[in-house]
Amino acid sequence: MNFLPFENITYTSNLDEEYAMRRLKQNVEETNNRGFRIWLFKKNPEKFFEGIISNKGFTINRIIYYTAINPVIVIGKIEKKDDGILIRIKFRLSSFHAMFASAWLLFSGFATAFTLIKYHGAGGPLICFAFFLIGYALAIMPFNIEGKTAKKALEYVFLAEEIEAEKLFHEI
C-alpha cells in the first residue's frame, strides 16, 4: 500500500516495441476527455484504458463505470532494450482528486490548528484531526485500489512483469 498518491514502476517484456504499441492501441480508447466519463451510457468496456498515445509515450487512465471521475492517471514510456522492452510507468492522482484532497486537508489542518490553539485540549481538535484522516483516506484508498487494478491490466497488455529496483540498477 502506498501512503502517498504516486508511484513509479518499471516493467520488462519480451515483446518488440512495435508489437507492444499495437497491443497498447488495441486496449486504449483514444480520447482527449481523460478522466471523465458518463458511465450510464456504456456498460461493457471493450478496452481497458482511455487516453492519448504518441510516439514519445502515453497518458492513460483505466475505464471505470462506477464513478464519473477516475482517480489514477498513468503516464508511460516504452524503451527498447536488447532482449525486449522496458516500460516505465508513473501512477499519479488525477487533477480533480488532487485538488479536492488538497482543499480538504488544508481546511481540516487549519481547523485542527485553530481549535488546538483556541480550545487547548478540548474535543474539537480531535474531531478536526479525524476529518483530516478521513480526507487522507479518501485520497489514498481509491488511488491504491485503482492503481492495483491498472497494474494488472498493464501487465496483461504488455505481457510484462515488474522489475525490482535492485535488478533494474544492475541492468543499466
Image (cartoon, helix red, strand yellow):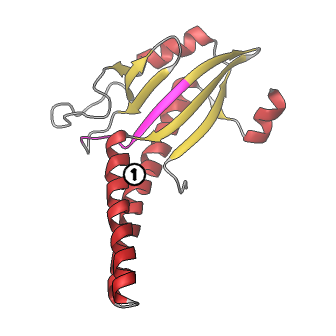
Query: For mark 1, what is the residue?
Result: 142
Residue drawn at (24%, 33%) of the image: 37
Q: Is residue 109 above or below residue 14?
A: below
Q: Is residue 18 above or below residue 51?
A: above
Give 139 or 125, whichever is nearer the viewer.
125
74 displayed left or right of 44: right
Q: Quadrant of the C terminus?
A: top right
Give 138 or 150, whichever is nearer the viewer.
138
Q: Is residue 139 above or below residue 44?
A: below
Q: Amino acid at mark 1?
A: Pro
- In the rendered image, residue 55 lying in the magenta stretch gets the answer no
Residue 127 image offset from top left, x and y in percent: 33, 80
Residue drawn at (30%, 29%) of the image: 45
| Chain part drawn in magenta | 68-76
Residue 65 image offset from top left, x and y in percent: 26, 39
Looking at the rendered structure, the secondary structure element under dot 1 is: helix
163 displayed left or right of 105: right
Residue drawn at (61%, 37%) of the image: 9
Residue 167 image offset from top left, x and y in percent: 79, 36
Question: Image quadrant of residue 138?
Answer: bottom left
Q: Quadrant of the N terminus?
A: bottom right
Residue 139 image offset from top left, x and y in percent: 39, 54
73 displayed left or right of 96: right
Q: Is residue 27 above or below residue 54?
A: below
- Using a 10 Å C-alpha cutoff, classify the residue at mark 1 as few (fewer than 14 neighbours), some (14 to 19) or many (20 or more): some
